[in-house]
């Protein structure tokens, strides 16, 4: 295949932008979804899903997946939910999984009421994804794949011709959005397309770390085994800012971090206070 000229590349880029804008408008207006089938981005998306289906990412038995949940104050010391302050264990198996059907909010890949399992390929990414505040206590759960799971991996998707479409697709899944944002409507629509093509889930890049996230459409105790959970405290945040006019990084003066012992002590005091103990 010959290399495209700069004029041809520019034409394809302009065509790509125009078609994705039309695709976006359909979700913005909330109607006429039938016209998507004549859209270049939609056609490209179908081709890519079929291409990935021929060589899916297979998560082998024993692959670890991490999932976090911020601990509610009313759950502190609630051993029925698994919270044990003697060994600082987090939520139990049931409480560490996705919400029950009908209880979930709009998510990146699920509509309101439909529950999917969201996890990450490392502990740090899983903790970042719940966006905790200083001295928030988080239950960090470890799961392991116990039956092969076939994943549509869009984190490494490439296309030399339609590079813009690749970039847009990755950004749709990693960009920050609210549950009512149009971006969520689009990622939910694409996730449903991928699910209907027989995939068990999706792998996509995290916007909060160098790691990757997973969404599993039909997680069960048969294909995802709960291993354990622990209580983690956010001890500090280190922001990094670049000045665009001075072309330098802004110096940080916030070097204070909460120690492990202080985190433990505050957690115990918080638990006692909520229970009305002295």
Image (cartoon, rainbow, N blue to C red):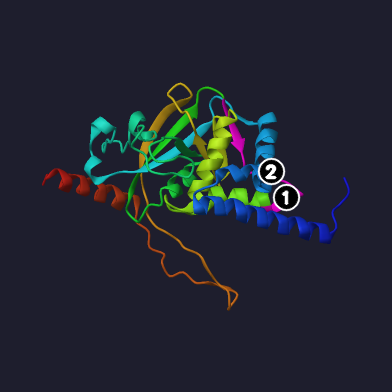
Q: Quadrant of the N terminus?
A: top right
In the picture, measured across the screen, residue 10 lies left or right of residue 120, that is: right
Q: Residues within 10 Å of mark 1 (few under 14, many from 20)?
A: some
- Residue at 66% x, 47% y is 41
Q: 190 or 18, which lies in front?
A: 18
Judged by depth in the image, the label closer to the viewer, 1 or 2, is: 2
Q: Reply yes or no: does residue 28 show up in magenta.
A: no
Residue 89: image x %, image y %? Answer: 32, 36
Identify which residue is drawn at 68% across, 39% down.
48
Q: Is residue 161 magenta?
A: yes
Residue holding disc 1: 162
**CA–CA distance between discs 1 and 2?**
8 Å
Q: Nearer the viewer, residue 120 or 140?
A: 120
Asked if one can make out residue 210 in the rendered structure from this viewpoint, the answer is: no
Residue range corresponding to the magenta coloring: 149-164
- The answer to whether 79 is drawn above or below residue 157 in the figure is above
**Displayed quadrant of residue 60:** top right
Give x and y (percent) for residue 173: 54, 47
Tell me: 277 left or right of 211: left
In the image, 41 versus 93, the foreground residue is 41
Say which residue appears at 82% left-offset and 61% top-offset.
7
Of the numbered discs in the image, which one, if any, rests on residue 44? 2
Kindly check if marks 1 and 2 are in contact, taking CB atoms under 8 A apart as contact. Answer: yes
Give coordinates of residue 95: x percent, y percent: 33, 33
Q: Dot 2: few (<14), some (14–19), or many (≥20) neighbours within 10 Å?
A: some
SS at mark 2 in the image: helix
Q: Is 108 rendered above or below residue 8?
A: above
Q: Is residue 26 visible?
A: yes
Of callouts 1 and 2, which one flags the residue occurring earlier in the amino acid sequence?
2
Expressed as whole percent of the image width and height from the top left, the position of residue 11 reads: 77, 58
């Amino acid at each position: 295949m010959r290399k495209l000229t700069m004029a041809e590349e520019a034409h394809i880029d302009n065509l790509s932008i125009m078609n994705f804008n039309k695709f976006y408008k359909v979700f913005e207006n909330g109607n006429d979804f039938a016209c998507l089938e004549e859209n270049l981005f939609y056609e490209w998306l179908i081709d890519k899903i079929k291409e990935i289906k021929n060589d899916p990412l297979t998560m082998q038995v024993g692959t670890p997946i991490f999932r976090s949940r911020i601990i509610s104050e009313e759950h502190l010391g609630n051993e029925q939910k698994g919270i044990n302050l003697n060994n600082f264990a987090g939520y139990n198996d049931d409480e560490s999984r996705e919400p029950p059907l009908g209880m979930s909010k709009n998510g990146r890949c699920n509509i309101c009421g439909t529950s999917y399992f969201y996890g990450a390929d490392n502990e740090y990414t899983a903790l970042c994804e719940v966006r905790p505040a200083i001295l928030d206590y988080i239950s960090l759960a470890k799961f392991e794949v116990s039956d092969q799971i076939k994943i549509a991996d869009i984190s490494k998707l490439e296309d030399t011709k339609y590079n813009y479409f690749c970039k847009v697709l990755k950004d749709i899944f990693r960009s920050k959005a609210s549950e009512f944002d149009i971006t969520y409507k689009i990622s939910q629509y694409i996730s449903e397309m991928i699910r209907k093509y027989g995939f068990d889930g999706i792998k996509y890049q995290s916007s909060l770390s160098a790691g990757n996230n997973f969404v599993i459409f039909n997680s069960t105790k048969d294909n995802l085994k709960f291993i354990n959970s622990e209580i983690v405290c956010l001890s500090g945040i280190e922001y990094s800012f670049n000045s665009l006019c001075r072309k330098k990084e802004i110096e940080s003066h916030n070097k204070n971090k909460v120690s492990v012992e202080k985190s433990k002590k505050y957690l115990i005091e918080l638990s006692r206070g909520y229970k009305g103990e002295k």
